[in-house]
Image (tube, grey):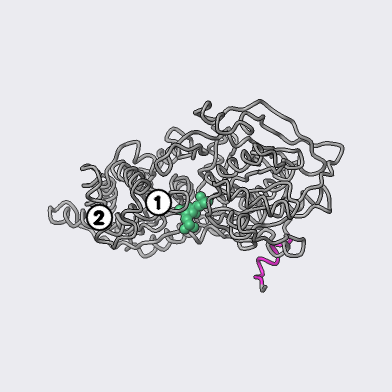
Amino acid sequence: MEISALQKERANYQPKLPIALQGAVKVKEGALTQSVDNQEDIKKLFPNTYGMPLVEFEPATEFNNAKMNVGVILSGGQAPGGHNVISGLFDEIKKLNPENRLFGFLMGPGGLVDHKYLEITAENLQAYRNTGGFDMIGSGRTKLEKEEQFEKGLEIIRKLDIKAIVIIGGDDSNTNACVLAEYYAAKKYGVQVIGCPKTIDGDLKNDQIETSFGFDTATKTYSELIGNIERDCNSARKYWHFIKLMGRSASHIALECALQTQPNICLISEEIEAKDMSLNAIVEDIAKTVAYRANQGNNFGVVLIPEGLIEFIPSIGRLIQELNDLLAAHGDEYLNLDKVAQREYILAHLSSENKSTFETLPEGVARQLSLDRDPHGNVQVSLIETEKLISEMVGVKLDQWKKEGKYNGKFSPLHHFFGYEGRCAAPSNFDADYCYALGSSAAQLIANGKTGYMAIVKNTIAGTDKWLAGGVPITMMMNMEKRNGEMKPVIRKALVELNGAPFKAFVAQREKWAKETCYVYPGPIQYWGASSVCDITTKTLFLEQNK
Ligand code: FBP
């Protein structure tokens, strides 16, 4: 494989570990835990993995030489740092006992079920250390949820003499990791399951998980691009850029990028939902800023739009809820019909309020909402061109104001979607270290007999030496939510908190950013050089931890 000059140098980077993981390690057990909500339901569903204590690692004097083979799975969307979780896991299990072996299941959870795997060795891992992407073993969105999948997986687990499976994934994948852990524990198979918090979306966080890996690198990558566009925009002064940013549900990515780049407008889905804003109200707000700036002679600007926006506009959210139920109960009756017949079927079955919302949406958007779901039941928001929908509506509003003599500017919109390009960037120093520590923690959880835990690293705004590593029972993060028409135990997704420090910091400045031009140009991720540039993490994490 031919590698770039950067890759060559970056391969030599030795990720830093918290003190507790640098030598021999022992476990300190903390308080027993409870789920965040619906305690009785969750306890009933997870009798073997509920209520376990928090775990923290401490330096020890004696080495644990646990003999264990481990399987690892990358699950869901790519996030920078996945390869470093694998590196940390590999190095730690070899440190425990050089005879330990690591197997990577290929193309996500499906690899476990289909018995497709690769043994990870020092040689084949070398080219992937500190690199972005999940291409070493691939990823996939197969949902591990059925007993026959668990039993199929067990066959290969037994064949390879695997003691534990590490699932590197987001909230849905870690929910499934917990279901698998519970199943193997209930059957007394002696197979442990450990999760690792991954997702660029940043929505897998709570009192125990400070951030999901990949968020740091992805937001730095997008902020670089946004900054470049802002500078171009401020040079030519003739375009309005509408930039949709990835992040399926929560607006953490958009908010972090706004804090880094100070655009004229950034929509935050959670605020729009809380204020019960209609699509029209959102459009009118943007048009007012465009008109204000035009009045100052500034026919240019930058608008950030979180990709999950559409689901948070209350009227559209209610429509999606009903479409989810319809899809779960009657999907078979219309999924195979042609486009026109499908639309007719759906319109005939919706309540009158949701029917009128459905009718007002452009046909392509309506179709995306009604048909496509990923295997976890999520609307595929990356495929909906919200940035175009909104800018077109702003254009229509401005034309109307022009006719009424209320606006006299030029509005030339351009559209961008920053998503996939941020998911496989070479991990920043933060993500490289964080992921390596997560992988090492996962190995230590296994060596100490834990199952149904997620590896965690805390105190992440301090230097790596001061980071605290350990594990949290996955059931602690669960509650019951409706999925595909049924109540299910799931890890609660963290949305942007409107009384949280990052959002408040944004609100304190956004009016100024809208009226004036206050762009900030973060530039590309730096891997070497001044620590004030290379080692800083996100503004979100900094503001949250300094609360
Ligand atoms: P995960 O939650 O699995 O980490 O995925 C995140 C994400 O990148 C979302 O931001 C995005 O909406 C989605 O994946 C896109 O999915 P796909 O890669 O299947 O198109």
Distance Cα–Cα, label 1 vs label 2: 22 Å
Image quarter hosting the N terminus:
bottom right
Name the amino acid, label 2.
Met
Cβ of mark 1 under 8 Å from ligand 1: the answer is: no
Q: Which is nearer the eye, 478 or 44?
A: 44
Q: What is the magenta range?
A: 3-12
| Quadrant of res 302 | bottom left
The question of residue 10 being in magenta is answered with: yes
Residue at (43, 49) in percent of width and height: 378
Residues at circles 1 and 2 in contact by the CB criterion of under 8 Å: no
Where residue 412 sits: x, y (%)? 29, 63
Q: Main secondary structure of the magenta part?
A: helix
How packed mark 2 is, by other alpha carbons closer than 10 Å (few <14, some 14-19, many 20 or more), is some
- The image shows residue 40, relative to residue 238, as above or below, that is above
| Quadrant of res 183 | top right
Residue 379 got which mark? 1
